[in-house]
Image (cartoon, grey):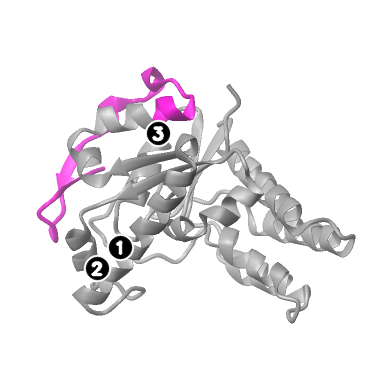
């Protein structure tokens, strides 16, 4: 079958990085993660008050330190592909942005233009990684699934969910989220509800993965996702997975 554009999201601190990093060990699947421009950049296109030149400034700021991207991962959070994984270059992003502006000025529909930009950049990423397919993760995708589906009608979405209290306890230690446990619990609930609502409307394109099962039954969970995506789990190097204990959590995690 044709490999569909595949995305991973969920509330922050739910294990989305862990899942995409592990799936990226499959020899046919290249992980791309922490690419919030996918949902933030189009906001410029849809705002008639903002000039197209702002797209260039946005792309310039976003890509200035590639392949590095800012993150708040702790030292104990080790990943095979690092805390972020973006292989396309700054020059490629600026070139694709220039193409996007040219298409928009010719009257091409925003969704078509932007889907092409994403496809071109992610294909470049795959070429650098010498793999045919990509899977793209950014937690906030869970709040923007209708927009992603407008870009890629045949998309698939993997929603990572985790015990709400554990997520909330982790969120309040980070600089980007709510400050109180009560606010963090509500934040988690909003994200989970958004993903599940989309999944209810698009059940064939939605799969839910529980973090707790991912760390206790990794072979089962990873094999299930790979089969659902249309890839052969037998090619996955399960022997490379090991479990370690985080110094700040009672839960085991995988590396």
Above or below: residue 15 compared with residue 23: below
Give the residue furthest to the front.
201
Residue behind mark 3: 25
Q: Which of the two residues, 241 or 153, is positioned nearer the viewer here?
A: 153
Measured in 3D between alpha carbons, the distance from the residue under mark 2 to the one under mark 3, in whole angstroms, is 32 Å
Q: Mark 3 to mark 1: distance in Å?
A: 31 Å
Location of residue 219 in the rendering, given as x and y in whole percent from the top left corner: 26, 28
Q: Residues within 10 Å of mark 2 (few under 14, many from 20)?
A: some
- Residue 180 position (above or below residue 170): below
Instruction: Tell me, yes or no, whether the highlighted magenta stretch contains residue 243.
Output: yes
Stretch in magenta: 226-255
Q: Residue at (56%, 48%) from the top-left corner?
A: 87
As drawn, the label of residue 163 is none
Compared across the picture, whether 133 is left or right of 26 comes to right
The answer to which image quadrant residue 169 occupies is bottom left
Q: Is residue 103 visible?
A: yes
- Mark 3 vs mark 1: in front: 1
Q: Is residue 64 visible?
A: no
Task: Count the labels in the image.
Answer: 3
**Residue occupied by mark 1:** 189
Q: Is residue 101 magenta?
A: no
N-term-proximal mark, 2 vs 3: 3
Q: Position of residue 240 (x, y in %)?
A: 28, 30
Give the residue drawn at x 44%, y 54%: 84
Q: Which residue is mark 2?
A: 185
At numbered mark 1, what does the secondary structure look like: helix, strand or loop?
A: helix
Q: Position of residue 198 (x, y in %)?
A: 46, 50
Could you say where residue 70 lies in the image, as x and y percent from the top left?
45, 66
Query: In the rendered structure, which disc, 3 or 1, sits on the residue that comes first in sequence?
Result: 3
Q: Residue at x 74, y 81 (%)?
A: 49
User: Are the residues tagged 1 and 2 within 8 Å (C-beta)?
Assistant: yes
> Relative to 221, does residue 80 appear above or below in the rendering?
below
């Amino acid at each position: 079958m044709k490999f569909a554009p595949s995305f991973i999201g969920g509330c922050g601190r739910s294990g989305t990085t862990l899942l995409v990093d592990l799936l990226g060990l499959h020899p046919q699947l290249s992980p791309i993660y922490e690419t919030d421009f996918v949902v933030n950049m189009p906001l410029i296109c849809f705002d008639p008050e903002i000039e197209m030149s702002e797209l260039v400034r946005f792309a310039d700021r976003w890509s200035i330190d590639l392949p590095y991207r800012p993150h708040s991962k702790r030292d104990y959070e080790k990943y095979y592909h690092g805390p972020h994984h973006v292989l396309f270059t700054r020059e490629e992003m600026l070139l694709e942005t220039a193409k996007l502006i040219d298409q928009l000025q010719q009257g091409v529909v925003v969704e078509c233009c932007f889907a092409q930009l994403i496809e071109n950049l992610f294909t470049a990423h795959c070429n650098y990684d010498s793999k045919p397919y990509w899977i793209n993760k950014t937690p906030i995708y869970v709040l923007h699934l209708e927009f992603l589906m407008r870009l890629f009608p045949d998309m698939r979405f993997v929603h990572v969910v985790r015990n709400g209290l554990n997520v909330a306890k982790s969120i309040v230690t980070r600089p980007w989220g709510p400050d109180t446990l009560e606010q963090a619990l509500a934040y988690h609930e909003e994200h989970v509800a958004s993903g599940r609502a989309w999944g209810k409307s698009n059940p064939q394109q939605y799969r839910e993965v529980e973090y707790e099962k991912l760390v206790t039954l990794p072979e089962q969970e990873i094999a299930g996702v790979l089969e659902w995506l249309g890839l052969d789990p037998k090619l996955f190097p399960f022997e490379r997975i090991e479990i370690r204990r985080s110094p700040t959590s009672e839960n085991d995690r995988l590396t």
